[in-house]
Amino acid sequence: MKKYKKDRYISGVITAIFAAAVILPVLTLFVWSFTQRWAWPYIIPGNFSLNAVIDVFEKLKKPGGILISGVVLSLITALLSVIIALMSAKALLFYNFPGRNALLFGSILPFIVPASVFSMGVQLLFINLGLNNTLHGVMIAHLIYSLPYALRLIMDAMSAIGEKYEEQARVLGACGIRAFVDITVPMLLPVSLTAFCMAYIISFSQYFLTLLIGGGRVITFTIIMVPYLTSGNRNFASAYSLVFLGISVIIFMLSKKAAAISNRQLKTQLY
């Protein structure tokens, strides 16, 4: 009994430490959003200001503003990443064809190649293709960079499921495409939503890639936010960071809710 209480106490302390590590920085950002100057060693800020908050809301309320354009761009990129990853994972796992190993190796390149190196290489290619300084060029660049992350997540899940369910569907008369769409895709929906969130966050947080490929003409939320972070303008940086964090959390929670609903429906269909 004493050991049980001791374990609970230790786990509670560890949980409190992790909670504080997450909550305190967010609270600091919130306070800085309403602060003009917060000099050391004062615990309470000396000057409060609404300039940063007003600036953020002025940009957010504009039709087709930077937040909407950035979110839509990232959502489209994430959706395309998941769709392509589903089909690519199927081909790479269950089919043999020339160049398969090269594609498998290429799928891990974003994990080992720095984003700056990747961005400069893509920029040279896009200049030759006429895609530089365009919105669709930025979207394709985001897609190239975020697709491998979605692909690796979906490949792991699809490898665990295997082809046995599709084979049973084909035995019962379903064609290959319908077996994949009606059987495998619903089973992969939870991990597909996770891959969607990953691809969205990667796309939404891209600064250097967007700046280089967009040439300053494609303005996203991150393009506006990062200069404040690097300039030391903490009140504006904090306000924009809170919006960035809030949007990401909302996308994550919606995906988590959709995954839970999908799991319940899948269990009902199977059992």
Image (spheres, helix red, strand yellow):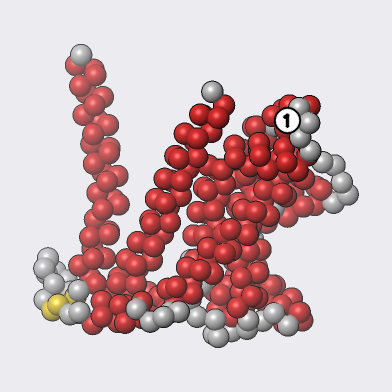
Residue position marked by numbered label 1 in the rendering: 169
What residue is drawn where x is 13% and y is 72%? 45
State the image coordinates of residue 4 (x, y, percent, origin top left).
24, 19
Quadrant containing the C terminus in the rendered view:
top right
**Furthest residue to the right?**
98
Quadrant containing the N terminus in the rendered view:
top left
Q: Amino acid at mark 1?
A: Ala
What residue is drawn where x is 75% and y is 43%? 177
Residue 138 visible within the image: yes
State the image coordinates of residue 88 (x, y, percent, origin top left).
72, 50
* Nearest the eye: 185 or 125: 185
Q: Is residue 251 above or below residue 242?
A: above
- Say whether residue 123 is left or right of residue 30: right
**Furthest residue to the top?**
1
What residue is drawn where x is 45% and y is 79%? 64
- Say whether residue 228 is left or right of residue 127: left
